[in-house]
Image (cartoon, rainbow, N blue to C red):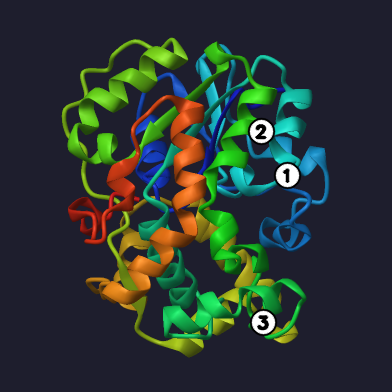
Amino acid sequence: MPQPNFFIVGSPKAGTSAMAQYLAEHANVFFSKPKEPFYWCRDFVESKSVHRLQGIDDYLRLFDDASESKYQIIAEGSTTYLQSRIALQSIREFNPDSKVLAMLRNPIDVVAAMHGELLRHGMEDQEQIEIAWSLQSSRQRGEGVPPNCKFPHQLQYRDVASYHDQIKRMMQQFPEDSRKIIFYEDFVSDTQRIYQDVLSFLGLEDDQRHEFPQVHASKVVRNRLVAKLSSDPPPWIAGTANRLKDWYYGSNGPMKRMLQSALTRKQKRQPLSDEFRHKLINEFRPDIEKLGELVGRDLSGWLVTTANPDSSKAIH
């Protein structure tokens, strides 16, 4: 039975969807549909309900079409795995020969992007990001969590974007030749080079790809009621809603793009206020400095008080 041997593990909003889409179009790569099964982050118990994967057999069925004679790489990409305390160890125990890819983005930009994403899906009910940030402690205790939120751990914005401990766990579980870290700034500035670098890491032949279309520009929902029904359908339409979601997550054609256009519209994300950006820089500074030492990279560019000019390119 085919089983995955490559995992894009996070961080969210750091180019993972784009990388997964580009790799999925390589002749020797199979990507699961849905791309994000959320199976191995079993410490986030709510995530189990998203794709109704009750056990390992349900999970492996996502790869039934991945003939090992045809595909060199069998992959999935659940961005919650990096934040999870147990997912990386579970993946390593499941397949000791697997490889993992972490994609990291300036945590201040990730907080802003995550807040917008959760709002769009009806899983965040505070439109003011400063208020959402201030509620992290109470929400961690289970207070004030929006009823439609399937991923309450993602409301912990500080934890989502604090990378040092996440990358340290990855290094402890995976040897150097089985792990790779990509920084969003590099991916945006030279996408082709980074893509080819990942192909080399995976032992894949260069497919001579030169076109890298934008993936997942910032959007807002046109109708909050539709977002609510999608994320938490009432029992009397749950069966139909779940079948539609299965189709949606497994599709990548014109019908899906037409539906996305009907339900959402592009919107440039509002910049953070100078005061709040400065607050976040101070919050994340110790973690950023420790991460830089861990990976041997100067990350001082993440500590500037003006918005990252690349943050608007939305190659998520």
Residue 241's place in the image compared with 223, above or below, is above
Mark 3, residue position: 237
The picture quadrant where one finds residue 195 is top left
In-image side of 256 versus 39 (left or right): left
Q: Which of 295 and 53 is in front in this view?
A: 295
Q: Mark 2 highlights which residue?
A: 169
The nearer-to-camera label among 3 and 2 is: 2
Instruction: Choose the circle earlier in sequence order: 3 or 2.
Output: 2
Residue type pointed to by label 1? Arg
User: Which class describes the residues within 10 Å of circle 2: few (<14), some (14-19), or many (20+)?
Assistant: some
Could you say whether the residue bearing mark 3 is in a helix, strand or loop? helix
- Marked residue nearer the N-terminal end (2 or 1): 1
Q: Position of residue 103 (x, y in %)?
A: 43, 38
How far separated are the C-alphas under marks 2 and 1? 8 Å
Judge whether residue 264 can be spotted in this image: no
Quarter of the rendering containing residue 6: top right
Q: Which residue is drawn at 53% across and 44% down?
A: 163
Verify CB contact (< 8 Å) between mark 3 and mark 2. Answer: no
Q: Are marks 2 and 1 in contact (CB under 8 Å)?
A: yes
Element at label 2: helix
The amino acid on which the numbered mark 2 sits, given as a three-letter code, is: Arg
How far apart in space, not on screen, are marks 1 and 3 (Cα)? 34 Å
**Dot 1 alpha-carbon crowd within 10 angstroms: few under 14, some 14 to 19, many 20 or more:** some
Q: Nearer the viewer, residue 66 or 133?
A: 133
The answer to whether residue 236 is left or right of residue 163 is right
Relative side of 229 to 312, left or right: right
> Residues under labels 3 and 2: Cα distance?
41 Å
Instruction: Tell me the residue that label 1 is attached to.
Output: 85
Element type at mark 1? loop
x, y (%) of residue 81? 63, 43
